[in-house]
Amino acid sequence: MSQTVDESKIGGLGVSRKRVEDNRFIRGRGNYTDDIVLPGMLHLEILRSPLAHARIKSIDTSRAWEIPGVRLVLTGEMAATRNLAWMPTLSYDTQAVLATDKVRFQGQEVACVVADDPYIAKDACEAIDVEYEPLPVVVNPEQAVAEDAPLIRDDKAGQTDNVVYRWEVGDPAGTDAAFEKADVVSKLRLHYPRSHPSPIECCGSVADFDRATNKLTVYMTTQAPHIIRAAVAMVAELPEHLIRIISPDIGGGFGNKVPVYPGYVCSILCSILLERPVKWIEDKTGNLISTGFARDMYLDGELALRADGKILGVRMHAEADHGAFFADAQPSKFKIGLLHSTFACYDVPAAHLTARGTYTNKAPGGVAYRCSFRVTEAMFFQERMVHQAAKDLGLDPAEFRRRNFVRAEDFPHRTPFGFLVDSGQPQACLDVGLRAVGYEDFLRQKEEARKRGRRLGIGISTMTEPLGAGNSREYDILGIKMFDSAELRVHMTGKAILRVGAKSQGQGHETTWAQIVSHELGIPADDVTVEEGDTDTAPFGMGTYASRSTPVAGAAISLVSRKIRAKARKLAAHLLEVSEEDLEWELGRFSVRGVPEHGVTIQECAMAAYGNMPDGMEPGLENHAYYDPPNLTWPFAVYIVTVEVDPETGVWDVLNTVAVDDCGVRINPMIVEGQIMGGLTEAYAMANMQFITFDAEGNCVGSNYMDYLLPTAWETPGFELHSEVVTPSPHHPIGAKGVGECAAVGGPAAFVNAVLDALDDTGVRNIDMPLLPDRVWEALTRRHDVSGAPPVRTDEQG
């Protein structure tokens, strides 16, 4: 009789194990940055600029200093004496910590106050008198490159215009040749508007500098503690071993908590100056108006098409609005992120992409909001272009995709932009989705409804996201290669502690990481404690963003577990008095080949590691692993949405949403489903209601939740999820590909395509997101495209 451990009973791979984290979260016992209270702690508040572009003529802080309880009023000039008025960004640019010469966006940090409590600090901020000289404002790339455009970054030596970078990839000559052979050229101009990750918890930090030890401890809302430690070391000129970054529980990040923000630096500098702990907690408007935005990219896209529906070539030009500072985190080699991952699932012979980044008078933008470095824009542009190309050819959108998908047997597939997509089953996923939504039947319903004055539409979107950036040959941030790490220690009782360089913001790491250990070693998941987020105890890692958790950190956990198992095998051979070659491994147990009843468990091996190890073997059962991925992982998904549009109001309702996600092996199916539902909710919000933009004066429109709407359970539609298609990653240790961002990446185009499909007899080719009712109504009644690009008119402007 087999004595193998039943993986399903110990919480291993494929088990919908309840989230361990929720034991404290649902009881209100989470430990967030604002929960940190230290003896003698002071509070910091930031004074922000009301103007988008203005010269600072003077700053008078005298009235603020007179308020009882104020301990410090810090300006840019004071910070400059410590060489901290400016700081480096994660994109090799510089960013003002506190403005010295001028302000460059509304909400920019101008000064800060430290006081006994946050209310005194807020009052003191209002007592600071700043005299501004307004300057012309730039709010989009077209204005940024105009001949008369004001120079935004006049602080940078040699900067003569507002261009951040120019970048290109692909085969321009081959693409030109493809377009010369085309029967039809489909063109589309698109704008993916600014959106904001809007985590429930805003950014914040508690800095505590100890003069006696010269050690700086900072509790903060960061998704990448080790990278922040390196940045702080550069900015504060302190050695890394005297800096401890602790990232406690995080109330959502979505990419918003990757950058280094001025508030972090201010709290650190003030703690050093005052030699007391200093807490900074951002408010919601501060978060919406000043922290890392996402998207804000414009596209001119063209597809060269053969009459039978074959794509011959792709030509794309992107304009990226980065705001006043190039501050988002991108792999150093790729200035516009992984936008060139577009069309990875389509068999495209030739492609060429050009891109330009510009400075504008807006908060720094471009963060990877729930996507792998601009992949959300890539997939949105791709699927909007594919939808329109099918319409231009008079082909069914599903059939057009079928004719151009890379076939399952043709993987690995090299894209025209150079990526190697290792595996996938696009056609199988599409077939599952079409069956689930009742595609042919819905098309009949659409035609019948049209005759009665009703407008139904169906939209398809596919998604191929490159995850796990990435291999050290091509991927780094600030010169640091994008590997990840794990340390595992199995105690003598068989219980284990796992420390990882990643950092959860809600992904369920404490639950799923233990499941990987359980799968590899047979130790019950409940016997594995997971720790991360503390640079003094966690191994070096690049943090959690761009769906790196499972593809990179998860792989490191698998590898370190296998190292542990290799040592346990030696211990088992010693205990059973046989050679290692004579042992067989069953989950959780070694046995002698041919004598299965003669064996030892992994727990018995752990005990032996501390009291009965063979001569010459070091005691203990612990190890570490660094994982440098050989390639990106490539999950694939199909999202299909049906809608009805009210022609009298422009309001559109979602009738059905079908999601088919092939993310390889699923560690915890329940958590995967939660990630997909969360991503689809965000996709729906981006497509339907999240509106944050700027007027001609650079005022942020949408800096509160009355204007920037977040979907509640009332608005959010239902989702139908399918997991029938599973294509394991051929190079990942457990075959997992990652899924946390997929629905947010691929979902928006499905909603937009569905609404435009309902308007397919009007000649309208595009409505910019969000598809607000007034935009849809305008497109429907006036039969023209509707742009949402800034500047927008405000009520005050008429």
Image (cartoon, helix red, strand yellow):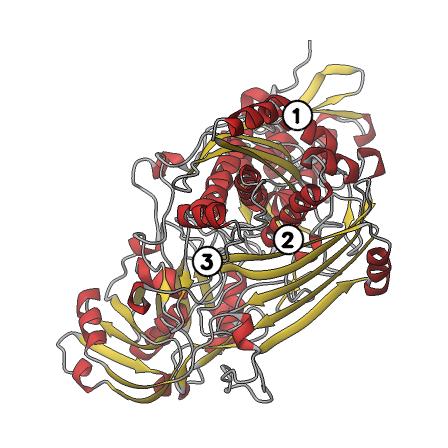
Between marks 1 and 3 in the image, the one whose residue lies nearer the viewer: 1
Residue at 76% across, 26% down: 577
**Left or right of residue 580, residue 298 in this image:** left
Residue ID for mark 3: 257
Compute the Cα span from label 3 to label 2.
Answer: 22 Å
Give the spatial CA distance, label 2 vs label 1: 24 Å
* Picture residue at 64% right of the left edge, 70% below the top: 356
Visible residue check, residue 524: no
Q: Residue 254 placed where, x, y %?
A: 48, 51
Tell me, yes or no, if residue 716 can be seen here. yes
Total residue callouts: 3
Vertical comparison of 415 with 566: above or below: below
Residue toward you, 357 or 438: 438
- Contact between marks 1 and 3 (CB within 8 A): the answer is no
| Residue at the spot 71% in from the left edge and 49% down from the top edge | 632
Label 3 secondary element: loop
Q: Residues within 10 Å of mark 3 (few under 14, many from 20)?
A: many
Residue type, label 1: Val
Which residue position is annotated with label 2? 378
Q: Secondary structure at mark 1?
A: helix
Residue marked by disc 1? 432
Residue 443 in picture, x, y percent from top left: 61, 27
Q: Which amino acid, by three-letter code, is at mark 3? A: Lys
